[in-house]
Image (tube, helix red, strand yellow):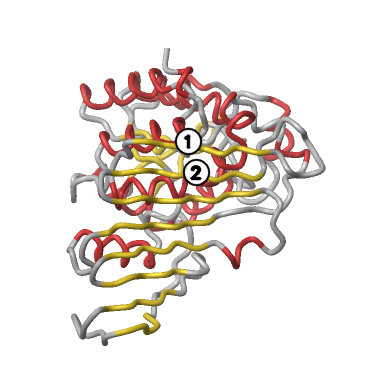
Amino acid sequence: MKVKLAQYGVLHDHASGKARVMKESHEVDFCGVFEPDPEARKALSKSDPYRDVNWFSRKEDMLGDETIDGIAIQGRVADNLAFADEVLSCDKHVWLDKPAGDNLQAFRQVLAVANEKGLLVQLGYMFRYNAGFQFILDWVKSGRLGHIFSVRARISSGVVNESHWDRWNSHAERDGGILFILACHLIDIIVALLGRPDTVTSHLRHDGDHFPWFQDNNVVVFEYPNAMAVLESTALEVASGTSRRIEVYGTQGSIIMEPLEPPQLRLCLDTDRDGYKKGWQPVHIEPRPRYVDSLRAFVADIRGEKEPDRSLEHEFTVQETVLRASRIESLDS
C-alpha cells in the first residue's frame, strides 16, 4: 500500500525537488500542497513540478486528513519549526528540510513531541544517501581507516542573487550566511563522522561586492579530543560545484571525494585490504539523484520496515553544531 504524503510550504530551496520525487514515487500517494503565502502559491502553482498537483485551500484540510501519514516541511527556514509543530500535533510524521530553524529550544521541543508520540522527524540533508558519503561513513565507522584525526571539507556557491532574500528570512540565514544555508550539509556529515565537537571556532566574513550584511566567505574549525575538522564555505566561487570536496585522514588510510556530485572518490591505504591495494586508487561510486533515497528511507520508516538511519539525538546535535558554527547560540531561549 502506498504511503500518503503531503507538502507544507513551497519556499524552501529544496521544495520543488522534494515535490518532484514524491510526485514520481511509486511508493507514495502525493496528496497535495498547502502554501500559506497567496502570492507564492499564485507564482508557483502552475510551474513544474506543482502543475496538476492538488493545492489545499486551507491548512486544516491537509492537517485534518487522517489518511495522510506524513508531511514534507518545505517553507522558509524561519517558519518550518512552527509548521512541524502543527504537523506533529496532528499525529503525522515529519520530513523536515534543513537547517532546522534558528531557535534551538524550539527544535528541542519539536523533537521531544515526536519522541513522546513515537513519530518520525527526518531532516532533509541531501548527502546522507549519496553513495560516496555512505562509502566514507562505512569505512570510518568500521575502523578500516584507523583513527580519524583530520577532516577537511569545502562546499560553496556562486554569488547569491536578490531572489533569495524573500525566502531567506531567518536570523541565522542572514547572520550565519552561506555557512548556515549551505555548509550545514557537510556539518551533518562531520557530526556523523566525529560526533559533537568540543570547540567550534568560526571566522565569518563578508568579502564580496553585494549585500554587506551577508557572510559570504567563511571558515569553521571543529575541535575534538584527538581530531580536528575544517570546513570552508563561500558564496563567491566560480563553477563551485566542481570544487566541492571532503577529505578524511586516518592512521591507516585516507579518502578524498571531489566533486561530491557526481561522487568521484580516491582511497589510500597503508596495506592491501578489503579488495583494495596499498596506496592511492580510484573507487567507482554510482551517482544517485538527490532526495530519492531519502524519501525511500522515510517511507520505509513510516511502514516500520526499518529503524531510522539517524536518531533524534543526531538531528539535535547537528542543529546545535550548525548554530554554534553560525554564532547563533543566543537564540536557544
Where in the figure is residue 232, as x and y percent of width and height?
54, 51
Residue 64 shows up from this direction:
no
* Kind of residue sitting beneath label 2: Val
Residue 308 left/right relative to 17: left
Q: Which residue is mark 2?
A: 220
Residue 282 shows up from this direction:
yes
- Image height check: is 221 above or below 319? below
Counting other residues with Cα less than 10 Å from the Cα at mark 2, is it few (<14), some (14-19), or many (20 or more)?
many
Q: Residue furthest front?
A: 226
Secondary structure found at label 2: strand
Where in the figure is residue 150, as x and y percent of width and height?
35, 57
Mark pair 2, 1: CA separation: 7 Å
Between 180 and 255, the residue placed more toward the observer is 255
Q: Which residue is mark 1?
A: 325
Q: Does the CB distance between marks 2 and 1 fall below 8 Å? A: yes
Image quadrant where one finds the C terminus: top left
Q: Residue at x 42, y 70 (%)?
A: 256
Q: Residue at x 48, y 63 (%)?
A: 289
Could you tell which of marks 2 and 1 lies nearer the N-terminus? Answer: 2
* Kind of residue sitting beneath label 1: Ala
